[in-house]
Image (cartoon, helix red, strand yellow):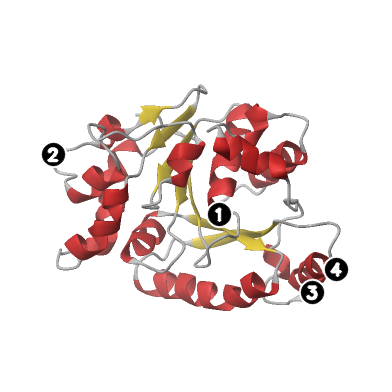
């Protein structure tokens, strides 16, 4: 085991469509390009982060579902798989994960299953990124019980901005009751359309809202069709098209995250 200090970061938002999975994939890949070792843990039953990293899930493959349901006999190292990019690994998800909610309900310590399952890999990566379902669920609670940091993607749209309040209530409740080490590292404005007044208005609101202003990353992720194209072919945008807005925005966000060294 290495003695490096792993930054364990949940990318979370209870609202769907805000660029959460895209941020997980592309921020992880951008950090990999900065010569950091990164593990992505896909905790969303829709397994979009898994697909976005070019992995096809088959029935024989061990996934995060197996790990959290049977961590006594299945070890994290058995479930980790390399991607096509050196230094970027994945614990894949599976649609079966949607059933874990019901299966875990009566289990003792159910909110700490992921934390216990991943204890054995502490210090093996520079970063661990956790993708979360777009809802408050037992899976999300497991992620927030394990993570040390939260990055919150917020689409520059009124609905997404309005939903931040509820998300922060959830994070504070987890801090108070389950994981006192959890901190919000920052909010990243996503899907910013430079042509629309509404995007500019919401970005200004984020910058001027005393609750969020100090947490806002300087980097803004612009709307960029190349990001969607890259997800479609299972390749992060920083490897898919290096000259695109998506690539430069996520590279900038990675550098900003590296400079915000977490205690």
Q: Residue at x 29, y 52 (%)?
A: 97
Q: Earlier in the sequence, mark 4 or mark 2?
A: 2
Gap between marks 2 and 1 measured at Cα = 31 Å
Which numbered mark, 4 or 2, is in the foreground of this view? 4
Which numbered mark, 3 or 1, is in the foreground of this view? 1
Q: Are marks 3 and 2 in contact (CB under 8 Å)?
A: no
Please, what secondary structure does the residue beneath circle 3 have?
Answer: helix
Around disc 3, counting alpha carbons within 10 Å, would you say few (fewer than 14), some (14 to 19), or many (20 or more)? few
Residue at numbered disc 3: 208
Report the disc number at residue 73: 2
Using the rendered view, name the quadrant where residue 237 is placed.
Answer: top right
Q: Is residue 255 visible?
A: no
Q: Are marks 4 and 3 in contact (CB under 8 Å)?
A: no
Q: Residue at x 86, y 58 (%)?
A: 195
Give x and y (percent) for residue 244. Answer: 76, 35
Please, what secondary structure does the residue beneath circle 4 have?
Answer: helix
Q: Residue at x 22, y 62 (%)?
A: 110
Residue at numbered disc 1: 20
Residue at numbered disc 4: 197
Q: Earlier in the sequence, mark 2 or mark 1?
A: 1
Depth order, front residue of 93/91? 93
Gap between marks 3 and 2 measured at Cα = 50 Å
Q: Earlier in the sequence, mark 3 or mark 2?
A: 2
Around disc 1, counting alpha carbons within 10 Å, would you say few (fewer than 14), some (14 to 19), or many (20 or more)? many
Which numbered mark, 4 or 1, is in the foreground of this view? 4
Q: Earlier in the sequence, mark 3 or mark 1?
A: 1
Left or right? Give the position of 218 relative to 17: right
Around disc 4, counting alpha carbons within 10 Å, would you say few (fewer than 14), some (14 to 19), or many (20 or more)? few
Gap between marks 4 and 3 measured at Cα = 16 Å
């Amino acid at each position: 085991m290495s003695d490096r200090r792993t930054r364990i970061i949940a990318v979370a938002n209870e609202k769907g469509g805000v660029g959460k999975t895209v941020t997980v994939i592309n921020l992880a890949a951008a950090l990999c390009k900065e010569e950091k070792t990164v593990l992505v843990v896909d905790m969303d039953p829709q397994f979009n982060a898994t697909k976005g990293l070019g992995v096809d899930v088959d029935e024989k493959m061990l996934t995060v579902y197996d790990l959290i349901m049977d961590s006594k006999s299945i070890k994290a190292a058995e479930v980790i798989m390399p991607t096509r990019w050196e230094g970027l690994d994945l614990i894949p998800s599976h649609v079966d994960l949607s059933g874990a909610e019901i299966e875990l309900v009566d289990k003792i310590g159910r909110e700490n299953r992921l934390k216990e399952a991943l204890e054995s890999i502490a210090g093996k990566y520079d970063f661990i990124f956790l993708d979360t379902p777009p809802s408050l669920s037992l899976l999300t609670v497991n992620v927030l019980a394990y993570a040390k940091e939260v990055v919150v993607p917020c689409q520059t749209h009124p609905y997404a901005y309005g939903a931040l309040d509820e998300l922060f209530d959830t994070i504070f409740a987890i801090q108070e009751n389950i994981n006192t080490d959890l901190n919000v590292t920052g909010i990243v404005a996503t899907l910013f359309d430079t042509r629309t007044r509404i995007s500019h208005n919401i970005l200004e609101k984020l910058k001027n809202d005393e609750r969020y202003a100090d947490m806002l990353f300087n980097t803004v992720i612009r709307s960029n069709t190349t990001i969607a194209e890259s997800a479609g072919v299972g390749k992060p945008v920083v490897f898919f098209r290096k000259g695109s807005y998506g690539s430069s925005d996520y590279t900038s966000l990675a550098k900003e995250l590296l400079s915000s060294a977490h205690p």
